[in-house]
Image (cartoon, grey):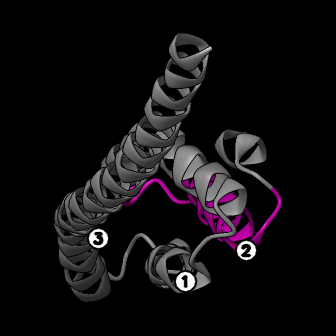
Amino acid sequence: MAGNLIGGAALGQAFRMLSESISQAGQTSVCFDSNFRRLNSILLSVKPVLEDIERLNKALEGRESEIEIFKKRLEEGEKLVRKCSKIKRYNLCKRWYYSRKLADLENSTLKFFSVHGLIQTCRDRKQILVALKEEGEKLDEIYSILKNMKLDKSRQISSR
């Protein structure tokens, strides 16, 4: 199953629930088969990125609020897929309505993950640059201290 590989926190559970819902609905409901396949494809392409985000957030003692954004989005999708799986084949009005909802979910999910992912990437890069700048300043201080120590030592040797 696609959701089994994502780490144990809330994001992994939401991903797994959506993935399982799509699989179950795809097996029981033929009405939205192409929609479910496209959604599953989106999930499979996003899964490695979500795994990395969750893993890195844990390593950085991260921001759970960012994971919550993704989690809520996955839960919304899971609810919609469950609703769609209950629609009977002969109910054309509901099939049309929910096929539009699924198409909107596909489009908005792709946009959502790309925009929020890009924003997080930009912010994370800025944080990395700030941390590198701070570390560079510390290294410069250490270098100047060592240089002064070397000069002091050479003066002591020359004065003897």
Q: Which residue is mark 1?
A: 68
Residue 81 image position (x, y, % from top left): 49, 73
Mark 2, Cα crowd under 10 Å, few <14 / some 14-19 / many 20+, is some
* Residue 105, horizontal then vertical, whole percent: 27, 72
Q: Which residues are magenta?
A: 8-32
Q: Count numbered badges in the picture.
A: 3
- Compared to residue 56, the image places residue 112 above or below, namely below
Residue at screen point 78% across, 45% down: 4
Circle on res. 13: none
Q: Is residue 124 left or right of residue 75?
A: left
Q: Measured along the vertical axis of the image, is residue 148 above or below residue 155?
A: below
For marks 3 and 1 on the same chain, the one whose residue lies earlier in the sequence: 1
Q: Which residue is mark 2?
A: 10
Task: Indicate which disc residue 102 carries.
Answer: 3
Element under disc 2: helix
The one of 98 and 137 positioned closer to us in this rendering: 137
Q: Which residue is rendered at x = 61% and y = 62% of the image?
A: 57
Residue occupying image coordinates x 32% and y 45%: 38
Which SS class for mark 3?
A: helix
Q: Main secondary structure of the magenta part?
A: helix
Location of residue 36 in the rendering, given as x and y in whole percent from the top left corner:
41, 53
Q: Amino acid at mark 2?
A: Ala
Q: Earlier in the sequence, mark 2 or mark 1?
A: 2
Task: Indicate whether residue 27 is drawn in magenta.
Answer: yes
